[in-house]
Amino acid sequence: MSQVKTQPRETDYSPEAPFGQEYGPALMGPFAPVLEESVLDDLEVEGEIPSDLNGVYLRNGPNPRFPPQGRYHPFDGDGMIHAAHFENGRVVYRNRWIRTAGLVEEERAGKATFWGIRETLKGRSDKRLKDGANTDVIGHGGIALASWYMSGDIYKLDPVTLETLGTAPYAQGLGGGFSAHSKVDESTGELMFFDYWNESPYMSYGVVSANGQVKNHVPIQLPGARLPHDMAITSNYSILHDLPLLHEEKALAAGRHKLEFHPEMSTRFGVIPRYGDSDSIRWFEFSPCFLYHTVNAWEEGDEVVMVGCRYMPARTASGDIDSKRTARDIAELKMNARLWRWRMNMKTGQCKEEPIDDRYNVEFPSFRAERIGQKTRYAYLVDHNPEMLHWTGIRKFDTDTGQLLGAFSDGHAHSWYSEPWFAPAGRGSAEDDGYVVVFRWDQANREQQLQVFDARDINPGPIARVKMPVRVPSGFHACWINHERIADIRSA
Ligand SMILES: [Fe+2]
């Protein structure tokens, strides 16, 4: 079995720095924005693109259009989608900015007009951060939806041309926002979402039908303002997160963003029936942790089971939780996560948690998403270098047993992988009968590839390497939309 070796990050970020090196490493090398939108076909392929891989792999991420005002954080950038559209053994690559209201405002001004989260918001009379829709992308109702981790608008996109089609009104009322990491139940087409904000009740939860009708949207009372990041669904329930990560109040009042991790508080997961009202949520308490990303959740008898990547709090030399370092590492996206399982008994109220694997720092999970909410075994994750967003390879786990089933990287610390996503094969329906699709940038050799793996065994490496003349900057989340789910919206 090939093993991924985690090595120190290489420090040579030049020459990619379109705004100049004075903006620092967050806008250089693998993080440097690309300033052109491209459509590329007839790309050189080493190996063979399978003919039963049909659909589109979409990856979102920050890509600032203009040099930032003040200090930059990757959360600030304008969302850009990079797409690989596979059809009958061929692939077309496209990249395009999401034309958010913030991007349109800055294009009119010809410069950045917003300030980022590392700066005070006093520079704008409206004190708003820019909703760059740069965090997540999912398929729903035949189109793609892009969203922002701080809760904002929902941007509708053509999943093939990547044209921005406007915003969806799903989250109107209550807090008025829509967070990244909403979930689509592919068996019903329903979209489950959450919103969070800084005034009571602090959270809401909603359900949208396959054709865009809001079927449920209820307030969720939290004890105070929180910074949740993800949710999960089963066939009958949704699982909402109340994590001990808070804004520092004085900083927030002054228009600054500073996080606090509170190890004296519990991590709570709220299980609500899919169409439940506010009072029907049931909360379960667990050991304090932050949780960026869930893998999947399902029901087993009376239990609701959730699998995710538990952020392991930093520790002091004496073994206590180091709350300051934990908050700083979370803010800087320096992840140290382990695959974890939480069980919540809906009949007895009992709950328990356990590590699935305690060895590997893995994050940004994907799985066979058409089985979301049902029990799944296989997860495909990135191998996380502790440095910010540096993913040196991918791993496949059996989340039932904790067994590491595969690992691959090109063996280089200068490999920068994107979030992979599982794409079902046309040939069969076993859970891992499909492919894993991912972008990989080689910073040392200045080489960009789109890689396709056989999901049954990723150890031998890609079955197809698509060589790309343009770079895909390091980014956030990805999805796969199978060809039969892509609506023919251009002929409508
Ligand atoms: Fe995320």
Image (cartoon, helix red, strand yellow):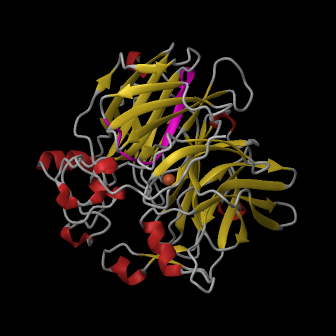
Image quarter for residue 122? bottom left
Instruction: Count up the numbered dots.
Output: 0
Q: Position of residue 432 (x, y in %)?
A: 70, 32
Residue furthest out toward the bottom: 318
Relative to 5, is 459 above or below? Answer: above
* Residue at the image position 36 percent from the left and 72 percent from the top: 257
Horizontal and vertical percent position of residue 243: 59, 69
Above or below, 469 relative to 199: above
Residue 235 vertical placement versus 27 (above, below): above
Q: Is residue 140 visible?
A: no
State yes or no: residue 18 in magenta.
Answer: no
The one of 236 and 399 positioned closer to us in this rendering: 399
> Observer-nearest residue: 416 or 232?
416
Residue depicted at x 40% and y 29%: 158
Task: Name the spot of residue 189 as percent of width and height, x first.
Answer: 61, 34
Compared across the picture, whether 322 is left or right of 105 comes to right
From the viewer's perspective, tell me whether residue 282 is left or right of residue 160.
right
The magenta segment is 471-485
467 sits to left or right of 192: left
| Res 233 visible | yes
Q: Residue at (49%, 39%) from the top-left corner?
A: 410
Quadrant where the C terminus is found in the figure: top left
Question: What quarter of the picture does the N terminus occupy?
Answer: top right
In the picture, residue 150 is in which quadrant?
bottom left
As drawn, is 172 to the left or to the right of 29?
right
| Residue that lies at the very extreme toward the left in this rendered image | 110
Q: Please tell me which residue lies in front, 46 or 161.
A: 46
Q: Where is residue 323? Give x, y as percent.
A: 53, 80
